[in-house]
Amino acid sequence: MKLLEDRIKKEGQALSETVLKVDSFINHQVDSEFMDALGRDFAEHFKDAGITKVFTIESSGIAPALMTAKHLNVPMVILKKQTSKILNGNVYQTRITSFTKGTSYELTLFADYIQPEDRILLIDDFLANGEAAMGASRIITESGATLAGIGILIEKSFQRGRKRLEEAGHRVYSQARIKRLDAGVIEFLAEDAPVTDVEENE
Ligand code: 5GP
């Protein structure tokens, strides 16, 4: 998606071979009009998928997920990151390990907010190794609902997440795909470029 690529070129900061900082419009300060445009694009892309709810993972996915839900005219649900297991209550939980941050958390969803007949569109800001998306997929599957699509703002295509999700049978659409990062360098991959084999890395 040209709009997002152009913004990344202008404001994105490649900190290393693996980390891209987009704090000025996605992760810290949020550009609401821009998020609305991204949400419209996701809604258009998945308009034939029968989506009944948009899910996201707190916190940076919330803004684009909300805009997507607005354009699809469905509710948005936030999967929470809890530090420990919730022992009472009707919840789905699964452990996620964040390689980028070296931390782990319990991805948590109250059962009231998902039904077996739901068709879910998952929206997240970054796709790296696919840990967060695979965790969300486990929760959705456990509830009996269907993960009908995954929308990502920025896919780091040199990491293994995209391949993992496609191998698991998911429909993935990334608005920007990054082929290579290095200090001060950001190279993009075409939207329809094939998914290549990647080393397990961060
Ligand atoms: P994954 O679960 O796919 O391994 O990692 C995705 C999650 O890690 C995203 O939800 C995002 O919060 C974070 N993340 C991964 N790589 C980056 C990055 O390069 N920049 C930023 N800002 N967040 C990242």
Image (tube, rainbow, N blue to C red):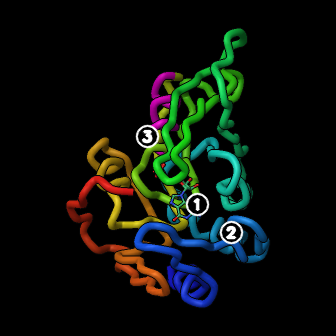
Residue 39 among those drawn in magenta: no
Name the kind of residue labelled 3 in the image. Met
Binning the other alpha carbons within 10 Å of mark 3 as few (below 14), some (14 to 19) or many (20 upward) gives some
Does the numbered disc 3 mark a residue whose Cβ is under 8 Å from ligand 1?
yes
Q: Secondary structure at mark 2?
A: helix
Earlier residue among tags 3 and 2: 2
Residue 48 located left or right of residue 110: left
What residue sits right under mark 3 in the picture? 134
Q: Secondary structure at mark 1?
A: strand
* Mark 1 touches mark 3? (CB < 8 Å): no
Q: Between residues 187 and 90, which one lies in front from this camera angle?
A: 187
Q: In the orientation shown, which residue stands out farthest toward the left?
A: 197
Does the numbered disc 2 mark a residue whose Cβ is under 8 Å from ligand 1?
yes
Quarter holding the C terminus is bottom left
Binning the other alpha carbons within 10 Å of mark 1 as few (below 14), some (14 to 19) or many (20 upward) gives many
Residue 50, image x, y percentages: 53, 46
Q: CA distance from mark 3 to mark 2?
A: 22 Å
Name the kind of residue labelled 2 in the image. Ile
What residue sits right under mark 2 in the picture? 26
Q: CA distance from mark 1 to mark 2?
A: 8 Å
- Total residue callouts: 3
Q: Main secondary structure of the magenta part?
A: helix
Residue 70, image x, y percentages: 74, 57
Image mark for residue 125: 1
* Mark 1 touches mark 2? (CB < 8 Å): yes
Residue drawn at the location 58% of the way across and 84% of the way down: 3
Earlier residue among tags 1 and 2: 2
Residue drawn at the location 31% of the way across and 41% of the way down: 168
Q: CA distance from mark 1 to mark 3?
A: 15 Å
Residue 121, image x, y percentages: 55, 48
The span picked out in magenta is 133-142
Does the numbered disc 1 mark a residue whose Cβ is under 8 Å from ligand 1?
yes
